Image (tube, grey):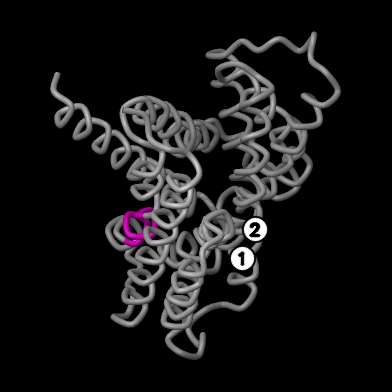
């Protein structure tokens, strides 16, 4: 297989993973009237933990206190991030929610680049967010925006916590343990929100489908893609998440966005790609390429 075909395959895997995530999010939105957003969080995390546990079969023994602290931090990040995300989805369009959520990783990229030019991308993202609100945020639910911003901050915290777990644990062990922690944390909120709906096997089965589409399949595809793509190229592809979310919201949920909102999403995507490239150039300045 040539290098070009390998890269094409990897890009396809990332795009398919993004599509699966947004289809899963759309399905979750459809289940909100039955199980509520926090009930949906619980179902997603519980089934994701079960699936990852069966795949990774992590050991609960022999880990240091620092390793367990990293796992707990990641588990909290997973529970809080998903909670804020689904609470935002209850009030905002899918494309808008994902666009605001992307501001978390975008801020990390800008900080990591340590270049003055990175603030240009920060300004562009700010213009995009203002456009997203139609210039006055009159079409956006204020509480939904707060939840989405909470998801953005939690996503940044998730990235930092995930890096610690990746160092402390081999393969998927750390993620599987963290997912179990997140699932346990979500139980009381999810049970209170979903109530007797959890006794319906059809809803529980749909919750399992959301877990597969939103977590298991995308993570597996991204893991394969990362072996074939440079990290910077992968990050740029992930910056397209607002576009795939907007498309899924339109096709599956009938969520229409105005032209100025679409422009806002495009500006945030452009800012994300620019920030990733700036951070990549910073890495090139510090570490000389081999060969």
Q: Residue furthest right?
A: 65
Q: Which residue is mark 2?
A: 153
> x and y percent of residue 79 in the render?
68, 43
Type of secondary structure dominating the magenta stretch: helix
- What percent of the width, then of the height, locates residue 23? 37, 46
Asked if disc 1 and disc 2 are in contact, CB closer than 8 Å, the reply is: yes
The spot of residue 150 in percent (x, y) is 66, 61
Picture layout, residue 270 above or below residue 168: below
- Which residue is painted at 47% across and 36% down in the image? 206
Q: CA distance from mark 1 to mark 2?
A: 6 Å
- The image quarter in which residue 277 lies: bottom left
Magenta range: 240-246
Q: Does residue 115 lie above or below 128 as drawn?
A: above
* Residue highlighted by disc 1: 149
Front position in the image: 125 or 153: 125
From the viewer's side, name the closer residue of 91 and 66.
Answer: 66
In the image, 51 versus 39, the foreground residue is: 51
């Amino acid at each position: 297989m040539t290098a070009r075909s390998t890269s094409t395959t990897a890009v396809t895997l990332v795009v398919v993973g993004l599509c699966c995530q947004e289809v899963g999010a759309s399905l979750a939105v459809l289940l909100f009237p039955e199980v509520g957003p926090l009930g949906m969080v619980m179902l997603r995390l519980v089934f994701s933990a079960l699936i990852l546990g069966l795949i990774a079969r992590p050991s609960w023994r022999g880990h240091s206190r620092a390793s367990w602290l990293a796992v707990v931090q990641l588990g909290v990040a997973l529970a809080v991030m998903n909670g804020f995300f689904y609470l935002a989805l209850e009030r905002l369009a899918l494309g808008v929610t994902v666009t605001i959520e992307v501001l978390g990783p975008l801020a990390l990229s800008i900080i990591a680049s340590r270049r003055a030019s990175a603030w240009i991308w920060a300004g562009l993202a700010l213009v995009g967010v203002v456009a997203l609100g139609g210039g006055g945020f009159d079409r956006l639910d204020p509480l939904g925006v707060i939840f989405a911003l909470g998801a953005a901050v939690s996503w940044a915290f998730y990235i930092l916590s995930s890096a610690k777990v990746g160092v402390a644990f081999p393969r998927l062990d750390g993620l599987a343990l963290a997912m179990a922690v997140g699932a346990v944390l979500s139980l009381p909120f999810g049970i209170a929100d979903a109530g007797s709906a959890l006794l319906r096997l059809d809803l529980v089965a749909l919750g399992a489908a959301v877990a597969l589409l939103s977590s298991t399949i995308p993570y597996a595809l991204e893991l394969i893609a990362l072996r074939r793509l440079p990290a910077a190229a992968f990050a740029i592809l992930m910056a397209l998440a607002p576009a795939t979310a907007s498309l899924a919201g339109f096709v599956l949920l009938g969520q229409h966005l105005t032209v100025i909102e679409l422009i806002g999403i495009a500006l945030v995507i452009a800012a994300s790609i620019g920030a990733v490239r700036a951070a990549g150039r910073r890495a090139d300045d510090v570490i000389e390429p081999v060969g």
